Amino acid sequence: MPDQTTSSIVIDATAQAVMAVIVDFEDYPAWVQGMKNVRVTRTDDAGRAAEVHFELEAAPIKDSYTLAYDYVSDTTLRWHLTEGRMLRAMEGSYDLVPNGTGTEVTYKLAVDVAIPMIGMLRRKAEKVIVDTALKGLKKRVESLA
């Protein structure tokens, strides 16, 4: 897997409130840019989403892919790609750390695409994805508080 991109943001909410938005996958089209459809395809013994299918249309990218989730703790969620068309591999995580009255959220992402792409461009695309996701998450969580 190629190098990962990492970024953090502080959200004015508890880690529990932030994680609740992160794991509400089927609500992603309401706040994740370009997300058209999300469907939980498998749950774990605790009733949490274990595998989720996503349909993304963020010009110029249109893709359909499935991620498997690992609930490491109440404050850490990891995932990896199980199926994709344009994506060959994807690994990522959200790590939440209480920070005063809010929560610091660190998002890590590594993506490998099926089309040839210069490493520098891939990392730049990852950075845009990570930063956009963190800003969207912050806006969504704080609007619900």
Image (tube, helix red, strand yellow):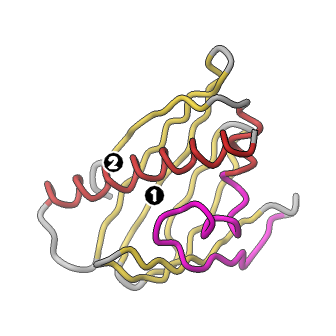
How many tags in the picture? 2
Q: Earlier in the sequence, mark 1 or mark 2?
A: 2
Residue at left 52%, top 80%?
55
Q: Secondary structure at mark 2?
A: loop
Residue at left 45%, top 81%?
84
Extreme-top residue of the structure: 100
Tell me the kind of residue under disc 1. Answer: Glu
Residue at left 34%, top 81%?
86
Task: Give the image quarter of residue 13.
Answer: top right
Residue at the disc numbered 2: 4
Image height of 59 relative to 104, above or below: below
Task: Give the image quarter of residue 98.
Answer: top right
Residue 21 in picture, x, y percent from top left? 70, 51
Q: Secondary structure at mark 1?
A: strand
Residue 144 in picture, x, y percent from top left? 74, 45
Specify few, some or many for label 1: CA neighbours under 10 Å numbering under 14, 14-19, or 20 or more.
some
C-beta proximity under 8 Å, tags 1 and 2: yes
Is residue 106 rendered to the left or right of residue 12? left
Is residue 3 rendered to the left or right of residue 10? left
The verdict on residue 28 being magenta is: yes
Residue 118 in picture, x, y percent from top left? 11, 64
Image height of 32 relative to 124, above or below: below
Where does the magenta region start and end?
Answer: 22-44
Image height of 64 relative to 45, above or below: below
Is residue 24 rendered to the left or right of residue 12? right
Mark carried by residue 2: none
Specify few, some or many for label 2: CA neighbours under 10 Å numbering under 14, 14-19, or 20 or more.
some
Residue at the disc numbered 1: 91
